[in-house]
Amino acid sequence: MAAGVPIAFQEVLNLQQLQVPETSIKHGLTTMESDKWIVSVEPNQVSLIDLQNQAQVTRRPIKAEAAVMNPSSNILALRSGKTIQMFNLDSKSKLKSHDVDSPIVFWKWTSATNLALVTATSVYHWSTEGADAPAKIFERHATIGSNTQIINYTVSPDNKWCLLGGISAGSAPGVVNGNMQLYSVEKKVSQPLSGHGGSFCSIKLAGRDDMAQCLVFHEKKPEDPAHRLFVMEVGRDPSKGAPHRIPPTQIPVPPEAASDFPVSLVIDAKNDVAFLLTKAGFVYMFDIHSGKTMFRTRITQETMFVTCAQASTGAVFGITVRTGRVYRVGLNGANLIPYIVNTLRDNDLAIKVAGRLGLPGAEHLYTQQFEALMGAGQ
């Protein structure tokens, strides 16, 4: 990648080199919920790749259809037929087991204590604590029905909002529609959204004491070629004022990627940045506070089918389908402000981002701004 760009990008691991078969490196069979483990379901065994221990591989003779590791602790969830189980690998004990009524089409840990289960009609939450069975949270909206392949599910920091996302075939050949369902746990109301990816985050806004819990999502309506980024606050106490919301911003999709679509949107909570990753291997980096696109590049010709954030650095991990390349993409702070100033030519954005993140490169802009204010008598 060219020098001076504001992202750092590298291949950090290759699953095929760790003898994970190509047929297992795909959606539903290989999972990565955090920077601690990658889990791959293979014929007659499950491979556990310990990312905190030099990618040491442990292969267990387990027959399962799917497996997913807790993002915080060594609790492995296994699914076979209608039976789902949780095992504590440290104590070598079974925590819970349950037989579901309907097949699970997607599952994901939404926290250290909650495993979300999605069926053809509903979404359930299953806690690691206690002996309770999975609890039904809401039913899937008609716009995200059984013809939709679920590819993501996320819950807000306050656990009061849920976002279910999926893709389905469009009306024209090669067109893939994105549909999402935003659900309010308190109001028990759903709002359908047209788009391919979204996530929640908490940000500190200038001039406000309380944190803003925001939904960041991609919008692409079937009849409209435009891709937009939305940032809107959800769940704010009305007594504290109006919720934060910025006008949707246009996402600069290149002409050669007109039929491309996002497969995930991952939040860098450390820097208040959102990364949008697409099927064709493009990465877009947005400033959440303004909604502006700070950088776009193509990092691979392949699709990264599973992604997750690294909380300690804000970087994003992604795994390519079949080839099993594990990429790490993150903000390159040293290059960001010079890039915004010299390439984007957006001095206002440069000043705000530099001030918020404590980054170098905007010192001369502060001087210019001060002199302009002094000249204007302010």
Image: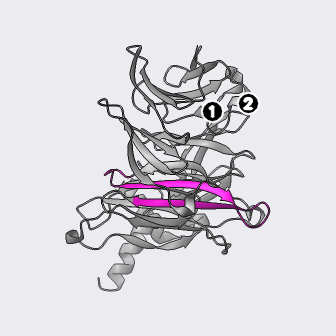
Where is residue 94 drawn, in percent x and y? 40, 19
Q: Mark 1 and mark 2: span between their CA atoms? A: 9 Å
Looking at the image, can residue 291 be seen? no
Question: What span is colored magenta in the figure?
Answer: 156-183
Where is residue 16 drawn, in percent x and y? 71, 26
Residue type for callout 2 = Thr
Please give the count of numbered marks on the rendered protein: 2
* Secondary element at tag 1: loop
Asked if residue 178 is among those painted magenta in the image, a careful observer would answer yes
Image-based side of 132 in relation to 348, left or right: left
Residue under the point 67% across and 37% down? 26
* Secondary element at tag 2: helix
Residue under the point 48% across and 58% down? 361
Where is residue 36 drawn, in percent x and y? 48, 29
Where is residue 25 drawn, in percent x and y? 68, 33
Residue nearest the observer in this picture, 221 or 289: 221
Please rate how many residues cluster around mark 2, counting C-alpha atoms within 10 Å: few if below 14, some from 14 to 19, many from 20: some
Q: Which mark is residue 374?
A: none
Which residue has dot 2 on it?
A: 23
Asked if residue 193 is among those painted magenta in the image, a careful observer would answer no
Quadrant of the image containing the C terminus: bottom left
The secondary structure making up most of the magenta span is strand
Please rate how many residues cluster around mark 1, counting C-alpha atoms within 10 Å: few if below 14, some from 14 to 19, many from 20: some
Looking at the image, can residue 244 be seen? yes
Residue nearest the observer in this picture, 158 or 63: 63
Query: Disc 1 vs disc 2: Cβ atoms closer than 8 Å?
Result: yes
Image-based side of 9 in relation to 208, left or right: right
Residue under the point 69% across and 47% down? 299
Which residue has dot 1 on it?
A: 29
| Farthest-out residue, front | 101
